[in-house]
Image (cartoon, rainbow, N blue to C red):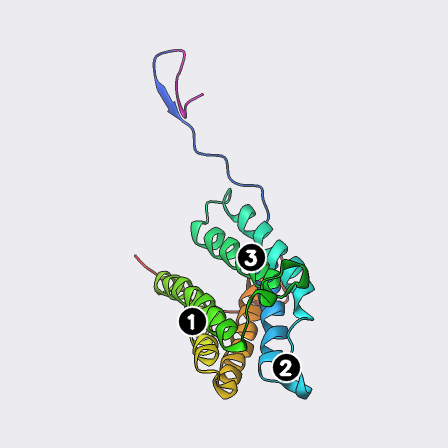
Amino acid sequence: MSDVEKGDIGTTHRYAPRPSTIGNPASLGLFSFASTTFILSFYNVSVDGITTPNVVVGMALFCGGLAQLLAGMWEFPRGNAFGATAFTSYGAFWLSFATIFLPGSGIVAAYDSEKELNNALGIYLFSWFIVTFLFFITSLRKSIAFIALFGFLSITFLLLGVGKFVTNPDISKAGGAFGIITAFIAYYIGLADLLASEKSPIVGLPLGAFKYD
C-alpha cells in the first residue's frame, strides 16, 4: 500500500512514516567499541609488560565485533545511515582483527618472517585509517564529541600502521596512548546517549552539537 491513498470523497491523505520503536542502540555500540579499544590500547602501551594482545581476541569477537555489528544493524531501521555504517564497519574490523590472532585461522603462521607480518598488518591498519578518516570528514557536521572521536581514532590507526611498517615500538605505544583517549571519548558519548534516552536522567552530558537554521 502506498503512502498516498484516495479518500471516500476523492481527497488524498498522506500518511507520515511510522516512527521506529527500536531503542537507541548507539550506547551499546559505543560501549562495546570503547571497552575493546581500551583493552587493546593498554596492551599496545605495554602496561605491566604485556606485549601479546591475544587475550583481547574473545573481547574483539563478542563485544567489539558481534555487539557492534548488531548495533549497526539496529541503526539501519532507525534511519541513521552514519551510525549504521560506522558500527557495522568497526564490528567487522574487530571480527577480522580477532580472526588474525586465532591460531586456527593460520593467518599469522602463514608468514615466514616477522617483518613480512608487520608489513601486512601495517597495510591492514592503513586501510582502516582511510575508512576512519572518511568518517571523520562526515562527523565535521555532527558534534565536537564525534569530531574528537574520529579524529583521535584516525591518529590511532595511523600511528599503529606506521609503527608496524617501521617496526618501531615507540610509535606503536603512541598509537596505544591515542587509543586510550579514543576509548574514553567513546565512553563519554555512549553515556551521553544513554542518559538522553532516559525519561528523567540524573544529569545530561553535552556533545557540543552544532545547530543549523
- Are the two marked residues, 1 and 3, in contact with CB atoms closer than 8 angstroms? no
Q: Answer above or below: position of 145 versus 46.
A: above
Disc 3: which residue: 91
Whether residue 171 is situated above or below residue 4 in the rendered picture: below
Q: Quadrant of residue 45?
A: bottom right
What kind of residue is marked 1? Ser
Q: Residue at x 54, y 56 (%)?
A: 92
Amino acid type of the residue that numbered disc 2 sits on in the rendered structure: Thr
Q: Is residue 118 above or below residue 17?
A: below
C-alpha gap between disc 1 and disc 3? 16 Å
In magenta segment, residue 209: no
Q: Residue at x 54, y 77 (%)?
A: 114
Magenta includes 6? yes
How far across and how far down the image is residue 127, in percent? 42, 64
Q: Which residues are magenta?
A: 1-8
Instruction: Find residue 51 and name its label.
Output: 2
Query: Horizontal placement of 44 versus 139: left or right?
Result: right
**Helix, strand, or loop for circle 1?**
helix
Q: Position of residue 53 (x, y in %)?
A: 64, 74
As helix, strand or loop, the secondary structure at mark 2 comes to loop
Q: Amino acid at mark 3?
A: Gly
Give the percent coordinates (x, y) of residue 185: 52, 72
- Eye-nearest disc, 2 or 3: 2
Q: Quarter of the image containing the N terminus?
A: top left
Residue underneath mark 1: 154
